[in-house]
Amino acid sequence: MSQRSYEDSCGAALAMDVVGERWALLIVRELLFGPKRFRDLRDGLPRASQNVLSQRLKELEADGIVRRVQLGPPVSAQAYELMERGRELEPVLMELARWGARAPAKSDAHLSTDAFMLLLKASHRRPGTNTPATAVRVLVGTDAFDVEAEGSSIRVGRATASKVDATVRSDVVTMRDLMFTGRTVSSAIADGTLEVGGDRSAAERFFTLFATPQA
């Protein structure tokens, strides 16, 4: 726990004692979909200084939110992952993402890949009755996620599935436009900002499954 405390016995205040310091909840966000090395956390949170990030991680570790783990082959390195107490914060972050998405975003504001995947999950809407289940691998830079949508449920995780209907490779800005602005897959392919593999109709369907939360 941070040395600063609200000294208030309300559950919300007690929670903020643990994750209310700047960057704490965003560290949790960056770890929702799997462990990360320190340098990967810095890449996802470029405005957090190394010292502040180290301090937040120490505090979260002391409070049983994260723990250090050793990644196995092919990468042998120390990383951080969420403990059960940390994973319990996912619904909180989902609701914050929905709530915050109603506010206008700065055009030049940073959005990490993991933040985008949380937004994707939070923005999933129930499709039409006859919409088939869709499994898509999302590739952004060196990151790969599998997204499986069926009915009102959606599952997002680091790529592990043996089979998906389609793969889409692009940047966060393009994918966000495809999800929320009506930009078409055809136009993104034509201008070279999107690559699609596998079933193109599944990729096109995939981008219709999301809507910006309304105020």
Image: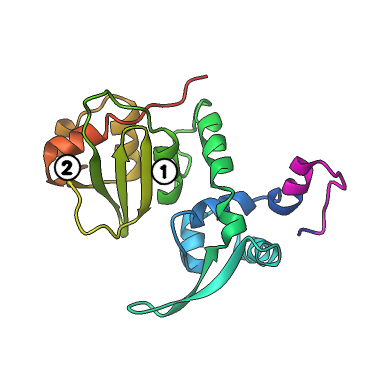
| Few, some or many residues within 10 Å of mark 2 (<14, 14–19, 20+) | few
Q: Which residue is label 1 attached to?
A: 116
* Residue visible at 77% across and 58% down in the picture: 2
Residue 198: x and y, percent?
A: 12, 47
Q: Residue at x 55, y 32 (%)?
A: 100
In the image, is residue 152 above or below residue 199?
above
Mark 1 and mark 2: Cα distance apart in space: 21 Å
- In the picture provided, is 63 more to the left or to the right than 114? right
Judged left or right of residue 22, residue 35 is left
Relative image position of residue 44 (x, y in whole percent): 47, 55
Q: Is residue 42 above or below residue 123?
A: below
| Front residue (pair 9, 37) | 9
Residue type at the position of mark 1: Phe
In the image, residue 184 sits, relative to residue 6, either above or below, namely: above
Residue identifier under label 2: 192
Tell me, what colour scheme is on the image?
rainbow
27 with respect to 131 (left or right): right
Q: Which residues are magenta?
A: 3-16
What is the secondary structure assignment of the residue under circle 2? Answer: loop
Nearer-N-terminus badge (1/2):
1
Q: Are marks 1 and 2 in contact (CB under 8 Å)?
A: no
Q: Amino acid at mark 2?
A: Gly
Secondary element at tag 1: helix
Please tell me whether residue 136 belongs to the stretch shown in magenta. no
Pair 1/2: label in front: 1
Camera-nearest residue between 167 and 161? 161
